[in-house]
Amino acid sequence: MKKKYIIYPLIVVIIGGLFFLKISSQNKKKFTSVKTAVAHKGEVKAYLSTTATIKSKNSKSYYGVQGKVKKINVSVGDKVSKSQVLITFETQDLNVAVKQAELQYNNAVLSKQDLENQNNNLNSKIADLDKQIADLDSQISALGGNKNAAAQIPQLTQQLQTLKSQRSSVQTVSGEKLQQADNAISLAKVSLDNARQNLAKNVDNITADFDGVVTSLNVVEGAMNSGGQPAVVVQDIENLKLQVSVGKYDANKVKLGQEAVVKSDNNQYKGSVSFISPAAQKAMAAGSTDTSLGIEIDVLEKAPDLKIDFDTDVDVLLGKASSVIKIPAECIKTDKTGKNFVYVVEGNKAVEKVVTLGLQSDTEVEVASGIKEGDKVILNPGVAVKNGSLVKEAVGGTK
């Protein structure tokens, strides 16, 4: 009998325990475990993160003249100074060609002058005869007759007619000759200009226009330089810029002067948007057309680990908002109509709050209205979380 009295209480305890576990399990199923973040005031920065190509701000390709390479004074990697001679060439003396062209031009000018002098001489002789005849007529009229003067007039008149006839003939021929002379002068002038230009271009060396480093050398000493590719390339590797291409959805967000952060491994450098192309460019890629806008970003600090023509990451600061209420971007949900909302924990329930968003970054969002500072907002609310759902904060879940 004593054993029976002991067994009955144990059975009651066991049954009670099982009932309690069942009730606790049922209650636990009604609550959804959530992680939360506290809405607080702070700064939100919006960045455009993209990849850029590193370029030199000062870069020049020197082609040189077509001819034999006489001497190469530099190697790839050498630092060079402004006005330093990099390469010399064997060139022909073009001064003789210039002198010949000058003589041809001068002869053409003299030929035209000779034609003009012939016409001027005839006109002068005719004018002299006209004057002589007029003077004789005056003498006859004044003296009432002068046999000597009268005898000279027919002879002079005959000479005058002969000269006028010659002038008419000369003028007919000389008109064409003068035009030919003008053409000869023009052709000689073209030849002279070309000869002078060739002489000016016919420099026998390549000199650096600025301080920099030789990054490419494509000639061999003693060999011919064709001029088809740069003989030498000099670049300033200390003053760098980035070339970026952005799509149409980001193009209007980028403005001149915006700050940028240039990233290379564990290093970061300050940058600034210095150029925005006035027009987009189209490029064919894998059978489709890719349209993008070119942007340049100056690197404002010395960056020895940035290598020209390599790619690097860059973040362009599109906007910044200070002392605003912000929450993690993962809190935001959007319905089919485009309405943005979050779930705030009030008591042990999830309460839906429609919010107006401001500036957004990849990780944080400015909330202009809808919640207040200190609200606990649910992170990544799943389908189980609805307006009025019972929720329970996970241990260590609040940010």
Image (cartoon, rainbow, N blue to C red):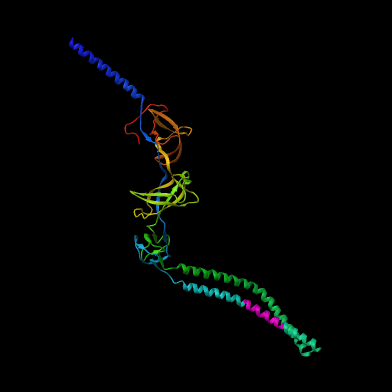
Q: Position of residue 135 (x, y in %)?
A: 75, 85
Q: Say whether residue 118 is magenta.
A: yes
Residue at 66%, 76% in the rendered image: 170
Q: Say whether residue 198 is magenta.
A: no
Q: Is residue 204 above or below residue 126?
A: above
Residue 158 or residue 47, whichever sits in front:
47
Residue at 47%, 68% in the rendered image: 200
Q: Position of residue 351 (x, y in %)?
A: 42, 29
Residue 212 or residue 195, whichever sits in front:
212
Looking at the rendering, which quadrant does residue 340 occupy? Answer: top left
Q: Is residue 174 above or below residue 14?
A: below
Q: List the single residue furthest toward the top.
A: 1
Residue 212 or residue 38, whichever sits in front:
38
Q: Is residue 323 above or below residue 24?
A: below
Q: How many marks?
A: 0
Q: Is residue 81 above or below residue 47?
A: below
Looking at the rendering, which quadrant does residue 344 occupy? Answer: top left
Q: What span is colored magenta in the figure?
A: 115-129
Q: Position of residue 184 (x, y in %)?
A: 58, 71
Q: Main secondary structure of the magenta part?
A: helix
Q: Quadrant of the C terminus?
A: top left
Q: Position of residue 216 (x, y in %)?
A: 37, 59
Residue at 39%, 51% in the rendered image: 270
Is 127 on the left-hand or right-hand side of 271?
right
Q: Quadrant of the N terminus?
A: top left
Looking at the rendering, which quadrant does residue 395 occupy? Answer: top left
